[in-house]
Image (spheres, rainbow, N blue to C red):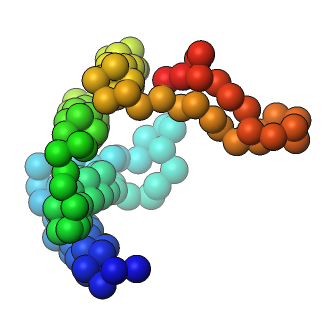
Amino acid sequence: MDPQDFYAYAAGGGLCLFLLYCLGPIAQRVGLVDRPSGRKQQLRPVALVGGIAVVVSFCLATLLMPISLTEYRVLFFCIVLLFITGVVDDLRELPPAAKFVMQLTVALALVFLDDQLVRFVGDILDGSGPNEYEPLGL
């Protein structure tokens, strides 16, 4: 592994831990918490900052990599769309249909704007080798 890659990974991981620690109290103040209820198992409110910490640290670590990010523009745009959807859902409890529409929109954007297809899923059915699903790819 290239040392610069290692530093980018370490910076991303360190930033993620730092953000988890620092954003917890802020989330409590602004109401970005998951409170115990009938279907929730935790005993006390939990700050909903994990996704924020992961996305911010992933983006920073990627920016520190010694590569061109031009070919990843659509992917980053889709990551930001899902990130915003997740934060809005945590704040306002979006209906499942709205979340599904956003996820489908992102999947279609990746397929049609960035030519990303799931062509093979591996040997998951009967042991006969990789299964090809390109006609169904999404």
Reply above or below: 4 against 48. Answer: below
- Pinpoint residue 47: horizontal percent, then vertical percent: 28, 56
Q: Residue at x 34, y 19 (%)?
A: 112
Residue 53 found in image quarter: bottom left
- Pinpoint residue 57: horizontal percent, then vertical percent: 23, 63
Task: Give the side of residue 66 with respect to residue 103, left or right.
Answer: left
Q: Residue at x 23, y 34 (%)?
A: 74
Task: Give the side of residue 3 with respect to residue 24, left or right.
Answer: right
Residue 114 found in image quarter: top left
Q: Quadrant of the N terminus?
A: bottom left
- Pinpoint residue 71: horizontal percent, then vertical percent: 23, 43
Reply above or below: 51 against 3. Answer: above
Q: Residue at x 73, y 32 (%)?
A: 131
- Pinpoint residue 21: horizontal percent, then vertical percent: 23, 72
Comparing 2 with 40, the one in front is: 2
Q: Residue at x 30, y 51 (%)?
A: 51
Comparing 118 with 89, the one in front is: 118
Residue 86 can be seen, yes or no = yes
Residue 83 found in image quarter: top left
